[in-house]
Image: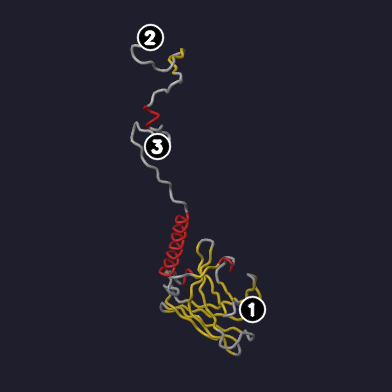
């Protein structure tokens, strides 16, 4: 990027709505370095209150807030400067040409923002950008938590019932008849059916009817 210098005014935002003008930032890009000098009149901030500075980059429909540094409030407001390489905004892979504004956040959560592109500034869409290593760590933590939860649910399930295999042609013990009953013929006085005729119990061999 060629030499560039401009001033952008900073406004306080409350519940996503733009409020009063609170000061300005002077941006200068020169020799591959971007310098930002801040001057804000915010007398109701406590002294030594830390102010985080985030560069705003648009990613699809979301806004990414990239940490650039910190400043400290004084008795008359905020005076300070941040600087970073033109080709690397903070520690992100984005560069200065992709940045469309700034967000300042106080320790108490107050927000002050400015923009120099023509897109709507919707701070409720903003997510703070995290380095890849930190994002991967959070992702792994979530996956491990889900895996542990699944294991706990499986442990609570009732164990499957065990079935004994029965050899082919053999009846289970619960339905088999006692051996005595299987080998005994009909007793005295019992009738045995043969076809449709009833025959009396067995007689000794050679005895005639």
Which image quarter holds the N terminus? bottom left
| In the image, farthest residue toward the front | 207
Residue position marked by numbered label 2 in the rendering: 208
Residue position marked by numbered label 3 in the rendering: 173
- Residue under the image location 33 percent in, 35 percent down: 167
Q: Earlier in the sequence, mark 3 or mark 2?
A: 3
Classed neighbour count for the residue bearing mark 1: other residues with Cα under 10 Å, few (<14), some (14–19), many (≥20) = some
Classed neighbour count for the residue bearing mark 2: other residues with Cα under 10 Å, few (<14), some (14–19), many (≥20) = few
Q: Residue 115, located in which quarter of the rendered image?
A: bottom right
Callout 1: SS: strand
Q: Which of marks 2 and 1 is nearer the N terminus?
A: 1
Callout 2: SS: loop
Whole-number angstrom distance, CA of label 2 to CA of label 1: 131 Å
In this rendering, the label closer to the viewer, 3 or 1? 3
- Identify whether 158 is placed above or below 179: below
Q: Which of 92 and 136 is in front in this view?
A: 136
Which image quarter holds the C terminus? top left
User: Which x, y percent locates residue 189?
Assistant: 46, 20
The disc label shown at residue 21, or none: 1
């Amino acid at each position: 990027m060629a030499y560039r210098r401009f001033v952008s005014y900073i406004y306080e935002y409350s519940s996503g709505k733009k409020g009063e003008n609170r000061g300005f930032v002077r941006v200068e890009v020169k020799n591959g370095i971007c310098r930002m000098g801040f001057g804000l009149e915010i007398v109701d901030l406590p002294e030594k209150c830390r102010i985080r500075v985030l560069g705003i980059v648009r990613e699809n429909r979301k806004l990414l807030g990239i940490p650039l540094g910190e400043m400290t409030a004084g008795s008359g407001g905020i005076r300070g400067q941040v600087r970073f390489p033109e080709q690397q905004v903070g520690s992100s892979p984005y560069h200065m040409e992709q940045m469309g504004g700034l967000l300042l956040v106080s320790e108490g959560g107050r927000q002050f923002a400015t923009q120099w592109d023509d897109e709507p500034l919707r701070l409720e869409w903003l997510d703070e950008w995290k380095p890849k290593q930190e994002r991967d760590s959070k992702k792994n933590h979530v996956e491990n938590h889900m895996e542990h939860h699944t294991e706990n649910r499986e442990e609570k399930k009732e164990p499957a019932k065990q079935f004994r295999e029965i050899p082919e042609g053999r009846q289970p013990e619960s339905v088999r008849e006692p051996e005595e009953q299987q080998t005994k013929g009909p007793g005295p006085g019992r009738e045995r059916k043969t076809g449709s005729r009833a025959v009396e119990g067995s007689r000794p061999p050679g005895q005639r009817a």
